Image: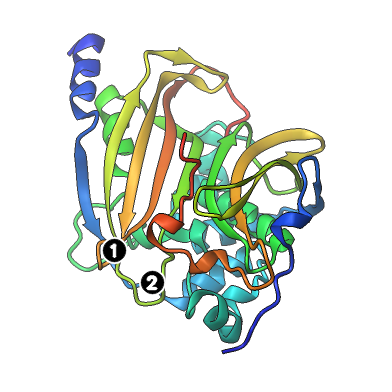
Amino acid sequence: MTDTDLLARALEMVGVEQYPEISEFPVERGYIWTSCASVENGNPLYWDDEVAGALTGGPIAPPTMVSVWFRPHSWAPGRAEVALPLQVHFDLKALFGLPEAVMSDNSIEFHTPVRLGDVLRTHQVLRSISDDKTTKLGTGRFWVIEVVYANQDGDLVAVESYTGFGYRRTTDGSGR
Amino acid sequence: MATIAPTLLFDDVRPGDTLPELRYDVSATTVVLGALAARDWRPMHHDHDFAVNRNGTRDIFLNTPNQAAWFERYLTDWTGPHGRLGRVTFRMLGSVFPGDTMALNGIVEGTEVDASGCGFASVAVTLSVDGDTKTTCAARIALPRRTDDNPWARRGDQWQPSPVSA
């Protein structure tokens, strides 16, 4: 298949809702505390139920954790293949035969707060794909993938946009 | 229900205001803990050999969701718990590795009261190592306009996390 054919195949995916998913587990406090601990975030909203009750009507998760609830378990019974988050990203790597990839840009718009016990839903949409580009890491393509999150009531929770760069190494880079 | 006094009010913020610097010594533990807290099991965030020999990077490096958590912590350290993030946009220019001392700095680029009456500050935050910018973050965060205002109480049309023109 030529590069032109591959690009045409990728462009067919642009704008299409893919990979509707339901989170493998409800939003829970252990991960919230682990995340806050990892960056030493002492915001009382996440540690003090009285503050959470007064400001947010009860405990919520830090908004920037929204993607955490969708990263699959590293293993699960009966799972034959490793489940990958942001599957569209890996589909594009495979389609173009690009062995390496990094994320360059990430944008998140926050809507309804995520609460303990929420079971979130998501889908992914490829928004754009570039021509061949060469950076200090190698040669490949940039792509933009949007991830839409909603809660079990259908309320929009967040819209996240990732810019990925899939590439083949040409030199030793400093990485991203 | 208890009343929590706001730490920072919208009217106390002006364009050009700077946020206190946050400095942090990054270790391998910082990187691995951050990746696992984000359920990111990919090897470049915990496996030195994979990071160096497959990704071509100097070492394992901070992952994107953990950097988002660092930026959120930095912003809400400034605003207090009333601060409600509307939108964040990150650009990763270089990696943050074990042994680096990262510095987060922020400056208020603008303030705006939207059509619903919600007050937002736009803040440009940089994460740098030895003066070299590794990540930039453009954040839009809501602040209370009065002591009895609470951006978290906004629902539906009363909450517009991005500027309407965006």
Above-or-below relation of A157 to B54: below
Image coordinates for residue A3, horizontal then vertical, percent: 25, 11
CA gap, disc 1 and disc 2 = 9 Å
Of residues A17 and B165, the one nearer the viewer is: B165
Q: Nearer the viewer, residue A29 or A85?
A: A29
Residue A123 vertical position relative to residue A141 in the rendered view, above or below: below
Q: Residue at x 64, y 76 (%)?
A: A44
Give the SS element for disc 1.
loop
Q: Which residue is rendered at x = 33% and y = 37% of the image?
A: A89
Q: Nearer the viewer, residue B2 or A29?
A: B2
Q: Are marks 1 and 2 in contact (CB under 8 Å)?
A: yes
Which quadrant is home to the N terminus of chain B?
A: bottom right
- Depicted A144 relative to depicted B49: above or below: above
| Closer to us: A138 or B69 | B69
Q: Give the residue furthest to the bottom.
A: B1
Q: Which residue is mark 2?
A: A27
- Which of the 4 quarters of the picture holds residue A157? bottom left
- Colour option used: rainbow
Q: On residue A23, which mark appears?
A: 1
Q: Is residue A3 above or below residue A82?
A: above
Spot occupied by residue B159 in the image (x, y as percentages of width and height): 46, 56
Q: Quadrant of residue A97?
A: top left
Chain designation of label 2 = A
Give the residue type at disc 2.
Val
Q: Which residue corresponds to the image point at 20% horizontal and 51% vertical from the top-left?
A: A20
Q: Which x, y percent locates residue A32?
A: 51, 71
Q: Tell me which residue sits at (18%, 21%) in the image.
A: A9
- Percent coordinates x, y for residue B41 in the rendering: 44, 55
As shown in the figure, which amino acid type bears the numbered disc 1?
A: Ser
**Crowdedness near tag 2: few (<14), some (14–19) or many (≥20) residues, C-alpha within 10 Å:** many
